[in-house]
Amino acid sequence: SFSIQHFFILHIFLYLFLLNLAKSNPDALTGELRLRLDNFSEFVKEPVGTERKATR
């Protein structure tokens, strides 16, 4: 079954990968993608804490 935790883990790996890509090659990321990463990092900070409390 596909759970929310799998979803978050997958996206966090993708996020970290893109972050490393941005550090090694800043020109690789467009403004739109940067905005998306910023939005996603904000999105991750909020629900993950509440999700983890709920699962335990």
Image: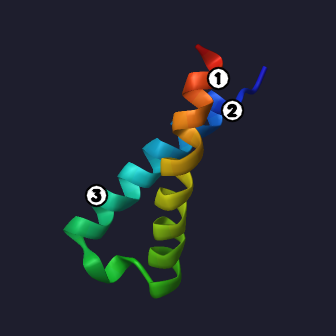
Residue 5: which numbered mark, if any? none
Alpha carbon distance from label 2 to label 3: 24 Å
Q: What amino acid is labelled 2 in the image?
A: Ile
Q: Position of residue 4 (x, y in %)?
A: 69, 32
Residue 54: which numbered mark, if any? 1
Residue 20: which numbered mark, if any? 3
Alpha carbon distance from label 1 to label 3: 31 Å
Q: N-terminal of the two: label 1 or label 3?
A: 3
What kind of element bears circle 3? helix
Q: N-terminal of the two: label 2 or label 3?
A: 2
Q: How is the image coloured?
A: rainbow
Work out which quarter of the rendered image holds the C terminus and state it: top right
Looking at the image, the residue that sits furthest to the left is 24
Q: Name the residue under label 2.
A: 4
Instruction: Decide: is 45 above or below 27.
Output: above
In the rendered structure, the answer to whether residue 5 lies left or right of residue 15 reads: right
Nearest the eye: 42 or 16:
42
Q: Which residue is drawn at 48% across and 49% down?
A: 45
Q: What amino acid is labelled 1 in the image?
A: Ala
